[in-house]
Image (cartoon, rainbow, N blue to C red):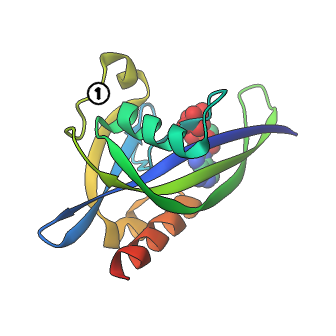
Amino acid sequence: MLREFSAGGVLVRVVRGRPMVAAIRPQGKRDTWALPKGNIDEGETPAETAVREVREETGVEGRLVEKLGDVKYVYTRRGGERVFKVVSFFLLRAGRGRLGEIDEAMRVEVAEARWLPLEEAPRLLSYGGEREMAAKAWEKMQA
Ligand code: ATP
């Protein structure tokens, strides 16, 4: 089976004591809320990819806190090829930048970006593995 490796971020910002997480709605998918992520480029560490993809897809700079875990799934490409994919997720603290202020070129991939309450993200995110990452991040923010 084909394999793909990506990395992404649970980008957290605390507003009046309430942790919020950046979620994106991928272009062409109605009602899907996902975490920002993308393909690991050559020469890049997964943590570097996570910070870069978060910046590109949300407009916000993230500071690495720690790794949260790996999300694994199998999907079928157009044409029928099956792909086994591993996405490493990292907890990031939001720094400079405004959510949604992204390059015009990125709008091909990202329809919308929003801050969601991290506590509710395990329910609001669309994919099981990403929900688990949000739940982990919530636990770490409570510690
Ligand atoms: P990347 O953001 O890593 O560049 P991509 O946009 O090319 O990736 P994916 O987001 O992996 O591709 O989407 C490929 C397929 O897998 C889509 O059908 C998508 O709905 C599905 N998918 C994405 N994330 C998950 C997940 N966490 N669990 C299950 N299926 C997923």
Which residue position holds label 1?
102
Q: Is residue 132 above or below residue 94?
A: below
Quadrant that contains the C terminus: bottom left
Picture coordinates of residue 62 (x, y %)? 35, 46
Residue occupying image coordinates x 30% and y 42%: 113
Residue 139 position by quadrant: bottom left
- Residue sitting farthest toward the top: 105
Label 1 sits on a secondary structure element that is: loop
Picture coordinates of residue 75 (x, y %)? 72, 43
Residue occupying image coordinates x 63% and y 49%: 87
Quadrant where ligand 1 appears: top right
Amino acid type at image mark 1: Ile
Residue 126 visible to the viewer:
no
Residue 142 visible to the viewer:
yes
Residue 71 position by quadrant: bottom right
Picture coordinates of residue 100 (x, y %)? 25, 36
Left or right, 51 with respect to 61, comes to right
The 10 Å Cα crowd at callout 1, few under 14, some 14 to 19, many 20 or more, is some
Residue occupying image coordinates x 31% and y 21%: 103
Picture coordinates of residue 6 (x, y %)? 62, 41
Left or right, 139 with respect to 100, comes to right
Quadrant that contains the N terminus: top right
**Relative to the observer, which residue lies in front, 63 or 11?**
63
Q: Is residue 7 above or below residue 38?
A: below
Question: How many discs mark residues in the rendered view?
Answer: 1
- Residue sitting farthest toward the right: 1
- Residue sitting farthest toward the bottom: 143
Residue 116 position by quadrant: bottom left
**Relative to the observer, which residue lies in front, 7 or 77?**
7
Residue occupying image coordinates x 51% and y 46%: 8
